[in-house]
Image (cartoon, rainbow, N blue to C red):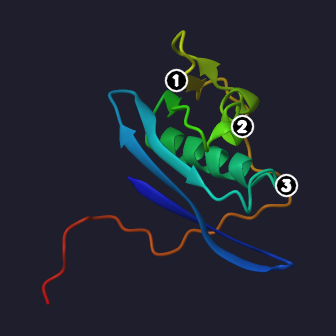
Amino acid sequence: RVYGLSVSDKFGDSGLVGVAAVKSEADGWHIDTLLLSCRVMGRTVETAFLAFLAQRAREDGAGYLIGEYVATPKNGPVRDLYSQHGFEPEDAEGRLWRLDLHTAALSYPSYIRIELHDELVSGAAKDR
């Protein structure tokens, strides 16, 4: 599953600022890729996006959400993203982070509204 994130606020439309690619596993979801624009980081947009993913995973019957952090020279600002949102380390290297969806209290900030648009249910191409 792939989810895109667009943001607009009183200052205007920032457009597409994030994407998450998740894999459904036996009883959980694994965030394979999470990309966020630095233009919106720190404005709690990341909290809303993670809360949205957790909600969708719960709705799908998942018991946990795994986030993956791979250190690079450019992604230092999100090094603590998962730990700041209630994820627990899953390995000694700090690469995998687990959120227990049965006990997690991750929610949207009250001033953020989530709207779903054009959700693609099937990846099948349409005949032309």
Count every numbered label the image shows and give the total: 3
Question: Which dot marks residue 106?
Answer: 2
How far apart in space, not on screen, are marks 1 and 3 (Cα)? 30 Å
Q: Position of residue 41 (x, y in %)?
A: 74, 53
Q: Position of residue 119 (x, y in %)?
A: 44, 68
Number of residues whose C-alpha sits closer than 10 Å to that of mark 1, classed few (under 14), some (14–19) or many (20 or more):
some
Drawn side of residue 12 relative to residue 127, left or right: right
Residue 125 vertical placement versus 26 (above, below): below
Q: Position of residue 57 (x, y in %)?
A: 49, 41
Number of residues whose C-alpha sits closer than 10 Å to that of mark 3, classed few (under 14), some (14–19) or many (20 or more):
few
Q: Which residue is mark 1?
A: 95
Drawn side of residue 19 relative to residue 17, left or right: left
Near-viewer residue (20 or 111): 20
Q: Amino acid at mark 3?
A: Ser
Number of residues whose C-alpha sits closer than 10 Å to that of mark 2, classed few (under 14), some (14–19) or many (20 or more):
some
Q: Amino acid at mark 2?
A: Leu
Q: Secondary structure at mark 2?
A: loop
Q: Which circle's residue, 1 or 2, is located before the other in the chain?
A: 1
Q: Which circle's residue, 1 or 3, is located before the other in the chain?
A: 1
Near-viewer residue (112 or 17): 17
Drawn side of residue 78 relative to residue 62, left or right: right
The residue shown at (71%, 30%) is 80
Q: Can you say which quadrant of the picture contains the C terminus?
A: bottom left
Camera sees residue 61: no
Q: Residue furthest left?
A: 127
Q: Secondary structure at mark 1?
A: loop
Q: Amino acid at mark 1?
A: Arg
Near-viewer residue (85 or 78): 78
Question: Which dot marks residue 110?
Answer: 3
Looking at the rendered image, the disc whose residue lies closer to the viewer, 1 or 3, is: 1
Question: Which dot marks residue 53?
Answer: none
